[in-house]
Image: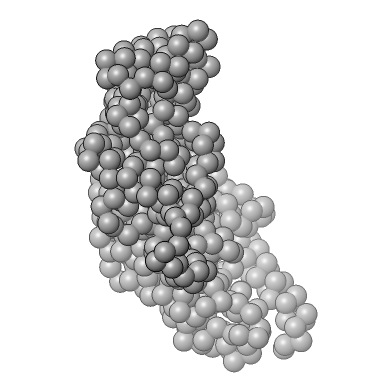
């Protein structure tokens, strides 16, 4: 391999003869093909990086015919042999990113930097001293002229369709090759956003300042947009298990950049998630899988991150509201993520955000409550509810999942009852609205419209599924899984530092009938009220309230 790359590089570097250039480029194609198909990663990487260097992308050298042909050859290799490129995709995608910048510059369009880095161009103009008409041309001016010439040559010679074809061909990649392709695209996208794409691309660092694709690159979202396109291409043609693996890579990227210090980068990341989420929710979820929960989790991670900007948290809630309004009929495991987002937003110090979250929850109760509490057909046989032992494994899992979704909705409402901060108490109207929700939930459980889980009780983790009271028999413990969330929420209201608020909570609670339709022994209620009373008494003694 050594003598081969030496002679090909030497001839391509020194010759301007079109026939010699074509022979050398064919040599690169065959060398890359043989090495990649034979899993010779070092040889493949060496030849591909050498070819990428001859594109002159990322440098300030004047492009010639052989450089343009090197770009075309690199694109064709990506389209034809992409299945075998593996980690070498990085060099190809970095070159494509530079191509997009140069095409945009030659087209006269504003670069991503102009709106991702507000005021950067004006600052540079202020820092640039005025230039006399008779001033001598500087090295920077010559570099700028060379860059502009190269950009115009790229625009005329390399079509947008060729670049699109590289990304469209991702549907032909195997699951493993697609994962490697996505990993490299994510790495390039991160480099673009940080403005350091040229580090280590072709071994040539541009010294030009102030150009749309020069040495001091600003942030860019070209690869982020392409990542959305890749997801769109592959979402419906890949098996769900394969897609889950690929989405794991993408979701980390979007979650990270949804909290980026640049507000516009965060906006684009959240908007990309919304676009993909709307498309993913076009089809109902397959049974036995929780892919909606996996797909929508980045929204929750962005909301939970303390570094997320206020406007981004507002944007996430707006996206959640839109997805619920337009795709509620297909939502299944995704409900849990939405309820968790509302629960987190309820404790947000910004009233606008917490009120928006409450309005979303109220909309769910007004329009989607029947969907969330509808008894599944397999729960009913000859007009009577099936016993737990008569359910199949799939039916038992569905029953547990429905109970978990209902509890998520309960916790979301009850999170609006407690006081966020003694110095900035929650408005009474918000807590009262949440208590009205609790009354609705109690009626639903009492009327049997929501069924308890059939297995999986535990008493140690309040946030985990099946949380119930200790010291109960199995049947009572399962039924109390639904009630405990309500009792804990009401107890949290009693523990509130606002005395007036506690009185209102107590009045509303005293008007509710004892829950449940079955006859219970005194044991479960002694356990329930014992736990709640002890918690409230402990808190009241510590705060000094009667």
Locate residue 231: give its quadrant.
Answer: top left
Residue 483, percent from left and from top: 52, 63
Residue 220 visible, this orientation: no
Residue 310, percent from left and from top: 50, 71
Q: Residue drawn 27% across and 15% down?
A: 19
* Residue reaching furthest to the front: 134
Residue 34 visible, this orientation: yes
Q: Is residue 162 left or right of residue 96?
A: left
Q: State whether residue 313 is above or below residue 251.
A: below
Which sits in the foreground, 264 or 14?
Answer: 14
Number of marks present in the image shown: 0
Q: State whether residue 39 is above or below residue 171.
A: above
Q: Residue drawn 27% across and 19% down?
A: 18
Q: State whether residue 248 is above or below residue 493.
A: above
Which sits in the foreground, 392 or 398?
Answer: 398
Q: Residue drawn 38% across and 45% down?
A: 146
Which sits in the foreground, 417 or 128?
Answer: 128
Residue 348, percent from left and from top: 54, 73
Q: Is residue 25 left or right of residue 470?
A: left
Q: How is the image coloured?
A: one colour
Locate residue 545: give its quadrant.
Answer: bottom right
Q: Is residue 45 left or right of residue 474?
A: left
Quadrant of image for the C terminus: bottom right
Q: Residue drawn 45% across and 45% down?
A: 189
Locate residue 141: give its quadrant.
Answer: bottom left
Residue 320, percent from left and from top: 37, 62
């Amino acid at each position: 391999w050594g003598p081969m790359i030496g002679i090909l590089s030497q001839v391509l570097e020194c010759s301007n003869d079109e026939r010699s250039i074509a022979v050398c480029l064919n040599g690169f194609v065959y060398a890359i093909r043989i090495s990649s198909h034979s899993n010779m990663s070092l040889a493949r990487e060496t030849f591909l990086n050498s070819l990428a260097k001859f594109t002159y992308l990322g440098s300030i050298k004047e492009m010639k015919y052989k450089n343009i042909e090197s770009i075309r050859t690199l694109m064709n290799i990506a389209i034809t042999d992409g299945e075998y490129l593996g980690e070498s995709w990085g060099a190809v995608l970095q070159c494509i990113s530079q191509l997009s910048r140069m095409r945009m510059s030659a087209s006269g369009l504003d670069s991503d930097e102009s709106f991702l880095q507000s005021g950067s161009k004006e600052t540079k103009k202020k820092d640039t001293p005025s230039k006399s008409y008779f001033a001598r041309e500087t090295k920077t001016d010559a570099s700028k002229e060379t860059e502009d010439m190269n950009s115009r040559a790229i625009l005329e010679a390399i079509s947008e369709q060729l670049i699109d074809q590289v990304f469209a061909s991702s549907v032909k990649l195997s699951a493993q090759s697609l994962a490697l392709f996505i990993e490299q695209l994510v790495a390039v996208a991160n480099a673009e956003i940080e403005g350091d794409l040229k580090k280590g691309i072709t071994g040539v660092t541009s010294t030009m300042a102030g150009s749309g694709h020069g040495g001091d690159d600003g942030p860019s979202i070209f690869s982020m947009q392409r990542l959305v396109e890749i997801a769109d291409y592959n979402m419906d043609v890949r098996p769900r298990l394969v897609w889950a693996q690929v989405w794991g890579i993408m979701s980390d990227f979007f979650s990270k950049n949804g909290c980026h210090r640049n507000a516009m980068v965060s906006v684009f990341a959240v908007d990309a998630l919304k676009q993909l989420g709307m498309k993913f929710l076009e089809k109902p979820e397959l049974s036995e899988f929780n892919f909606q929960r996996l797909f929508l989790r980045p929204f929750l991670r962005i909301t939970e991150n303390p570094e997320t900007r206020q406007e981004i948290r507002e944007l996430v809630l707006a996206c959640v509201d839109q997805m619920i309004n337009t795709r509620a009929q297909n939502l299944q495991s995704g409900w849990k993520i939405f309820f968790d987002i509302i629960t987190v937003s309820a404790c947000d110090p910004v009233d606008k955000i917490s009120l928006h979250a409450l309005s979303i929850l109220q909309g769910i109760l007004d329009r989607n409550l029947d969907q969330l509490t509808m008894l599944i057909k397999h729960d009913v046989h000859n007009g009577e509810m099936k016993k737990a032992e008569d359910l199949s494994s799939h039916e038992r899992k569905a029953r547990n999942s429905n109970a978990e979704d209902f509890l998520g909705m309960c916790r979301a409402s009850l999170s609006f009852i407690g006081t966020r901060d003694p110095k900035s108490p929650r408005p009474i109207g918000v807590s009262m609205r949440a208590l009205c929700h609790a009354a609705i939930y109690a009626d639903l459980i009492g009327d049997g419209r929501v069924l308890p889980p059939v297995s999986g009780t535990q008493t140690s983790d309040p946030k985990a599924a099946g949380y119930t009271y200790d010291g109960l028999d199995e049947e009572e413990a399962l039924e109390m899984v639904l009630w405990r969330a309500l009792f804990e929420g009401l107890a949290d209201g009693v523990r509130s530092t606002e005395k007036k608020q506690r009185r209102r909570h107590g009045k509303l609670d005293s008007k509710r009938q004892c829950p449940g339709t079955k006859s219970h022994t005194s044991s479960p209620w002694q356990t329930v009220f014992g736990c709640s009373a002890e918690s409230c008494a402990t808190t009241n003694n510590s705060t000094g309230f009667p």
